[in-house]
């Protein structure tokens, strides 16, 4: 004798392992999509701020220009390695030539794309053995394998004497 309960169970569609896997896969993909959609705006809104040793933010940018505080560069023939990055993702170096005359440049070696460092007299390639290129404060190669590759990229800049800020164009 068959009861109504048993009859309903016989007519019920049996779930197979494939259907269960497909359901779990669909749910997993949907949850991953929701998670990515929810996190992406949070991550894209993040900006990295570089703080110099004085605890100041050395530059702020809007995607096209950056402002670099150059008040610490008080002597002609000296420079400042900033924490501000150019479009090549290398730090921007600023040199002072005469009162109110500054030059901002990339610190990417033209020979090897290794970063350049400042030693108080000029820039040198940090690439190690065989990458011993030296550049003057104008960004021109003085020795090493970078000589035939020419100077580093110089960024157009304007000095705002009232604020002691160099406004550097780093992209469009």
Image (cartoon, rainbow, N blue to C red):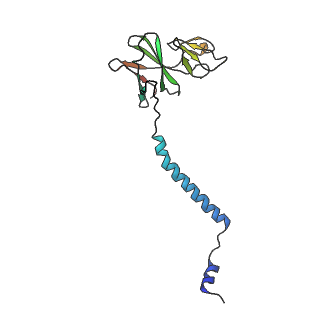
Q: Which image quarter is the C terminus in?
A: top left
Residue 123 drawn above or below residue 57: above
Q: Position of residue 60 (x, y in %)?
A: 41, 29
Q: Is residue 62 above or below residue 145?
A: below
Residue 143 % position (x, y)? 60, 10
Q: Position of residue 109 (x, y in %)?
A: 58, 19
**Nearer to us in this view, 141 or 74:** 74
State the residue at coordinates (63%, 83%). 6
Residue farthest along the left direction in this orientation: 162
Residue at left offset 60%, top offset 20%? 126
Say left or right for 19 vs 73: right
Depth check, front residue: 34 or 72: 72
The residue positioned 64% from the left and 17% from the top of the image is 131
Residue sitting at the far bottom? 1
Report which quarter residue 20 is drawn in. Answer: bottom right
Find residue 3 and report its horizontal and vertical position in percent: 62, 87
**What number of labels is visible?**
0
**Looking at the image, which is closer to me, 114 or 70?**
70
> Residue 65: in sight, yes or no?
no
Instruction: Please name whichever residue, 32 or 157, is drawn nearer the observer in this view of the structure.
Output: 32
> Is residue 22 something that shows in the picture?
yes
- The answer to which quarter of the image holds residue 103 is top left
The quadrant the N terminus occupies is bottom right
């Amino acid at each position: 004798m068959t009861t109504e309960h048993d009859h309903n169970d016989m007519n019920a569609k049996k779930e197979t392992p494939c259907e269960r896997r497909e359901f779990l896969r669909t749910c997993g993909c949907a949850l991953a999509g929701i998670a990515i959609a929810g996190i992406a705006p949070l991550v894209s809104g993040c900006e990295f701020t570089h703080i110099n040793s004085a605890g100041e933010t050395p530059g702020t940018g809007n995607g096209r220009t950056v402002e670099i505080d150059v008040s610490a560069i008080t002597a002609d023939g000296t420079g400042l390695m900033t924490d501000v990055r150019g479009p090549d993702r290398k730090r921007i170096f600023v040199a002072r030539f005469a009162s109110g005359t500054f030059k901002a440049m990339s610190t990417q070696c033209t020979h090897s794309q290794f970063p350049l460092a400042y030693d108080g007299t000029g820039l040198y390639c940090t690439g190690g053995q065989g990458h011993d290129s030296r550049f003057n404060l104008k960004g021109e190669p003085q020795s090493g394998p970078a000589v035939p590759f020419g100077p580093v990229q110089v960024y157009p800049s304007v000095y705002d004497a009232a604020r002691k800020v160099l406004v550097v164009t780093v992209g469009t």
